[in-house]
Structures are given as structure tokens and as C-alpha cells.
Amino acid sequence: MAIERTLSIIKPDATKRNLTGKIIAKFEEAGLRVIAQKRIHLTKAQAGTFYVVHKERPFYDELCEFMASEPVVVQVLEGEGAISKNREVMGATNPADAAEGTVRAEFAESVGENSVHGSDAPETAAEEISYFFSGLELVG
Ligand code: DAT
Ligand code: MG
């Protein structure tokens, strides 16, 4: 498997509860490297653009409100098969279905407030990374 890069977001429910370090530790223990990182407070419009693929879903407005409710930590993670490895460490979208030891099983509060985002494919990873970071900010 090739070295990949993926976009990770530590979401408002997690930054609010001071869980940033515990979540990053799980990524690092899985062999993922943080090659870019910043803490930002999204506007609802910026959250809406990021999640535009979900525009027609009934939870879209609530999702955008939530993502703009508190600061987030956006990161680029790099490693062997980083996209799927990150998704494994995150666990299922609904924490009730997430495997033991995953970020969402340990920390997520609900399907809506589920602590982390991770890109789901190479194309979305590239798009999502460029939404938040310039090439100069990726220090592999
Ligand atoms: P994931 O974040 O695992 O990639 P997704 O892309 O299907 O999941 O959905 C994006 C986010 O939208 C998800 O992290 C939380 C929210 N969401 C998804 N399904 C939801 C639902 N049934 N009710 C409320 N929020 C939901
Ligand atoms: Mg998704």
C-alpha cells in the first residue's frame, strides 16, 4: 500500500472536552504522522461548503451548526494507506456501531457529534486537504 495523505478534523465536541491530545495519540499509535495542523473556528458557511456533499440530507443544517459551534483542529495525516487506516482508527459514523478502542467508541457523544472527520477516498482527501491547507503548509 502506498503512502497517502488524508484530511482529519477533530470536531467541536472533542475540542470542547479537551480531548485533542488523546485523539492525536491514537492516530500516532496507528502509525499516522501529523504533517500539518491548525486550530480554527469555522463559520457556518465554511462548514456548509466543506460538507456540501451532504446538502440534501436532513441533518445538514444541524451538522453545519455543530461544526461552527466551537473551534476544530484540522490536520493532514500521512502514512501507509492513511485514508483507510484513519477511518479504522476513527470507527463507525455512529458510535453505537464503532469497534472497541476506536476514537468514536471511546469519545463520540452521538452520530451527529462524533468527535472526528476523516476523508473517505483519494479524490476527497486531495480536495479536503486543499480546502484547508496550502502546499507549503504540508511538512512531511
Ligand atoms: P463519516 O463522518 O463517518 O464520514 P458521513 O460522511 O456519512 O460520515 O456523514 C458526515 C457527518 O454527518 C457525520 O460524521 C455526522 C453527520 N451525520 C451522518 N449521519 C447522520 C445522522 N443520521 N444523523 C445526524 N448526523 C449525521
Ligand atoms: Mg464522510
Image (tube, rainbow, N blue to C red):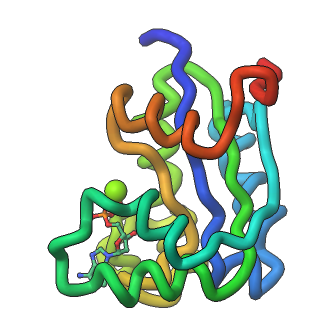
123 sits to left or right of 133: left
Q: What residue is rendered at 52% in x and 51% in y?
A: 89
- As rendered, which of 20 and 69 lies closer to the eye? 69
41, above or below 2, in the image: below
Q: Residue furthest front?
A: 45
Q: What residue is rendered at 65% in x and 70% in y?
A: 42
Q: What residue is rendered at 35% in x and 86% in y?
A: 61
62, above or below 137, in the image: below
- As rendered, which of 62 and 89 lies closer to the eye? 62
Q: Quadrant of ligand 1?
A: bottom left
Q: In which quarter of the image is residue 72?
A: bottom right
- As rendered, which of 129 and 82 lies closer to the eye? 129
Q: From the image, which quarter does the C terminus lie in?
A: top right
- As rendered, which of 120 and 53 lies closer to the eye? 53
Q: What residue is rendered at 52% in x and 30% in y?
A: 82
Q: Which residue lies furthest to the top in this view?
A: 2
59 sits to left or right of 139: left
Residue 128, position as x, y percentages in the image: 49, 42
51 sits to left or right of 2: left
The image shows a total of numbered marks equal to 0
Q: From the image, which quarter does the N terminus lie in?
A: top left
Residue 49, position as x, y percentages in the image: 43, 60
Residue 14, position as x, y percentages in the image: 68, 78
Residue 106, position as x, y percentages in the image: 57, 76
